[in-house]
Amino acid sequence: MKSARKVLDRPAWIKAASEILAEHGIEGLRVETLAKYLRVTKGSFYWHFKDRRDLHDAVLTHWKHGRIIDIQKQTRAEPGQEIAALLHTIEVYASPRSRRGIPIELAVRDWARRDAVAARIVEEVDTERLACTYRLFVACGLDDAEAKARSVMLYAYVFGVSLMRCERFASDLTALKTWIAERIAH
Amino acid sequence: MKSARKVLDRPAWIKAASEILAEHGIEGLRVETLAKYLRVTKGSFYWHFKDRRDLHDAVLTHWKHGRIIDIQKQTRAEPGQEIAALLHTIEVYASPRSRRGIPIELAVRDWARRDAVAARIVEEVDTERLACTYRLFVACGLDDAEAKARSVMLYAYVFGVSLMRCERFASDLTALKTWIAERIAH
DNA sequence: AAAACTCAATACGCTACCGTATGGAAGAAA
DNA sequence: TTTCTTCCATACGGTAGCGTATTGAGTTTT
């Protein structure tokens, strides 16, 4: 009994590409290895995408939309819950146990250091994100300058700490990161 | 008049490789492109190095030594000058005008996400660096936990902010970064 | 059932890249 | 001057990777 053909659509390719990107960086995202990852050959890839750059652009657009939707969700807070929302935003990225979205975040940012298209997407995402946290800080009663500074500090911290290896320096990273989060959020 | 042969030694190769790494990342560090960058062919490369991995290891060792010497210099402070030394440490990496060492820092860290040897070197460098700033914070009168947290926060911030694109969010980044540095250092 | 459409496999040509082997060139030592 | 040492150039073989062209297979439409 010949099984029905399992069809891969363009979004499936983009999703798989995003996984490879997160783990291997942009140089690891290869047409033939991606096809192999999906258990097909590259004929299918070239049906869906013009070339590798087309895939890159699709992955970036997908990442951008996902990040912006996420940040808007994370920073939606009832009055009086702003600090909790800010702490949650930090927690989502910086907690030793919950690192959601960090691998691809770092991969895209490293790519952006060398690719102008990626750099522009990162700029859009950063602008939106910083604006969201800025509004939370302002709702906490901070002035313009301080709200801006804390927004930058928040994201700089979560991205930066993900690049570091602190385990030999401090044994209780959970407590340490909680301390930092509290200082950033208020 | 035939000019004397300009001889490249192993350190010259390592230095050039470090420049390429900083700008193009580890995947951009190719034997043949590196040789071309140095205006020779790869015969010379293979005289000095066994293979590409040998070059990688040499570059990492070189980076580690340079970083550790730098941090020890930067954090050498007369009593009463600890805050100034901490602010200087932040300034060296995070100032919009002075980004010394950041490109290669980010390149090595991204590489370390995927390479166990690089990861171990990063761990060594981080451990040393955090210990240096920790001692400065302790000398400022902070307790163990706070000194540790601020050390992590300092480096997380400088690395993270280098990955971000804040220009559209805030026009006066110098003042903003000064505000953050002050909050981290005391 | 035949035709049209969608999706995927494969062959091909070309380039980049790595590492090895061999020979050449320059400088130093005998 | 000859020999030895150090360093470099080149040729070669093999693989990875990209994109294009062509064909095959499954599904949908007529």
Image (cartoon, coloured by chain):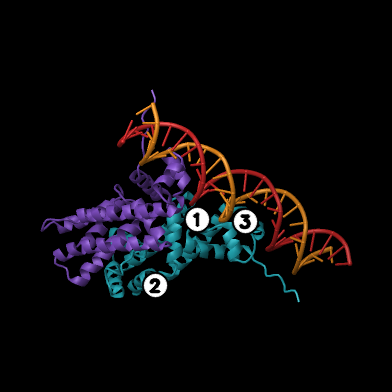
Chain colours: A cyan, B purple, C red, D orange
Q: Mark 3 points at which residue?
A: A49
Q: In this view, does B147 lie above or below B3?
A: below
Q: x, y (%) of residue A122? A: 44, 56
Q: Name the residue under label 2.
A: A77
- Residue type of the residue flagged with mark 1: Glu
Q: In this view, does B11 lie above or below B152?
A: above
Q: How far apart are marks 3 and 2 (CA)?
A: 40 Å
Q: Which of marks 3 and 2 is in front?
A: 3
Q: Which chain carries label 1?
A: A
Of labels 3 and 2, earlier in sequence is: 3
Structural crowding at the residue carrying mark 1, measured as other residues with C-alpha within 10 Å and reported as few (<14), some (14–19) or many (≥20): some
- Residue type of the residue flagged with mark 2: Ala
Most extreme residue toward the bottom, as rendered? A1
* Left or right: where A8 falls relative to D30: left
Q: Mark 1 points at which residue?
A: A27
Q: How far apart are marks 1 and 2 (CA)?
A: 39 Å
* Left or right: where A43 falls relative to A59: right
Query: D26 or C11, which lies in front?
Result: C11
Whether labels 1 and 2 share one chain: yes
Q: x, y (%) of residue A22? A: 48, 63
- Residue type of the residue flagged with mark 3: Phe
Classify mark 2: helix, strand or loop: loop
| Residue under the point 26% across and 59% down | B180
Q: Quadrant of the N terminus of chain A?
A: bottom right
| Residue under the point 10% across and 58% down | B79
Q: In which quarter of the image is the C terminus of chain A?
A: bottom left
Classify mark 3: helix, strand or loop: loop
Q: Mark 2 lies on which chain?
A: A
* Left or right: where A100 falls relative to A58: left
Instruction: Count the labels in the image.
Output: 3
Of labels 1 and 3, earlier in sequence is: 1
Q: Nearer the viewer, mark 1 or mark 2?
A: 1
